[in-house]
Image (cartoon, grey):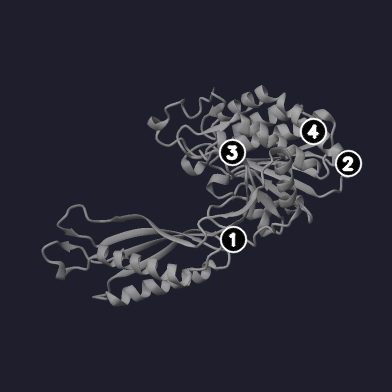
Amino acid sequence: MEDLEKKLQVISSAVERYREEMVRTLMDLISVPAISPDYGYEGEFDKAKLLLDTIGGWGFDRIDVFNASDPRAKNGARPNIIAYYYAENRDAPRTWVLSHMDVVPAGDLSQWTVTKPFNPLFRDGRIYGRGAEDNGQAIVSSLYAVKTLIDLGIRPRRTVALAFVSDEETGSRYGIKWLMENHSELFKPGDQALVPDYGAPDGSCIEVAEKSILWFRARVRGRQTHGSTPHRGLNAHRIAVDLIQRLDRVLHEKYSARDSLFDPPESTFEPTTSTNSSSAPNIIPGYHEFTFDCRLLPVYRVDDVLSDVYSIAGEVKRLYAMNEYPEIDIEVIQREDAPKPTDPNSEIVQLLKKVIKILRGVDARIVGIGGGTVAAVFRAVGIPAAVWSTIDSTAHEPNEYARLENIVSDAKVIAALSIL
């Protein structure tokens, strides 16, 4: 134990020496927008090139680039980079540390009051800019964790595979999902994964489970008429409101299990967007659509919820039936079926808890979340994955930032995790 603590002190001191370099690297990365073609931009090609130029001479044992083809993107490519630092035993299983290069669009520019989204600024210990926290902090922390080990000549117990992927913000079909579908040979039995894409300000939360996600749109078609003659039409708005209320009540009642691992501890069913065709107060609308955002505890199946949605829509349609109306169509916008959670007793989780306790004196909590991360992709193929980082949760916000102290501290944890 004494030797371990001494080694961790050496590593921590070495990480500290990279503070200024970490700031420069993150600011360089922020200054290169990497926004999906789904939003009308060029993708991650330029950021990937900058990243490769940055780490090319660092001493990684191997750096591979896998380009997913996307004709909408710059040079038709969505790059995925994997940088390896081998264990003494080349056949040792791998610890994957995965972060993503893509960022979301800037949003309302008038809300950016500290600096422009892609003109990074370092002020009062914070690096501001779009993608600073999501997911630039993870890129920099993981890079300098391994750079520290390389420069000290310390080999990890497991081979470390740093993956910098594309397309996380819009579904990962050109990122980690594409890698697993097209290069399954990269992922071995016994591998484990750390995904630094969720956390708490004190680094006390380790995420091991996620809810299933279901987004659906309902389109209700009635018959438009004048507000003074409602009997001549069929009010699509009224039908939609009734349908929303029934869905809200039935789904909450039927899928009411609670699991204290999650916050909130129950499944959620939330009506979100809503619009109809009425352009004036005296027009009874003949069309109305709305969407629902459903987050299901892993104990429930998405298909069962969908079956109930179709059944309830059918009941409402029969209730209001008049001259072939209403029409009610249900469209699935997105679904993510939650895989089996990572076992809290798995090596990656227990080692992470141990390191956090040693370096920070914090007893980390095991949690589940309602959002989705790429950890689910690892879990789906049987690779235990933990999601952890130290963040203020400014992702996707104007004036997004990452704290330098968090970047440095997370680098120490990732480096320590690699040698235990």
Mark found first going from the N terminus, 4 or 2 = 2
Q: Quadrant of the rendered structure where residue 413 is?
A: top right
From mark 3 to mark 4, how far is it between C-alphas?
A: 22 Å
Q: Residues within 10 Å of mark 4 (few under 14, many from 20)?
A: many
Residue at left offset 79%, top offset 56%: 189
Please name the amino acid that badge 4 sits on: Leu
Front-most of 54 and 145?
145
Q: Is residue 31 visible?
A: no
Mark found first going from the N terminus, 4 or 1 = 4
Secondary structure beneath dot 1 equals loop
Secondary structure beneath dot 3 equals helix
Marks 4 & 1, CB-CB < 8 Å contact = no
From mark 1 to mark 3, how far is it between C-alphas?
A: 22 Å
Q: Give residue 172's position: percent from left, percent from top.
A: 59, 49
Q: Residues within 10 Å of mark 3 (few under 14, many from 20)?
A: many
Q: Give residue 30's position: percent from left, percent from top.
A: 56, 30
Mark found first going from the N terminus, 1 or 2 = 2
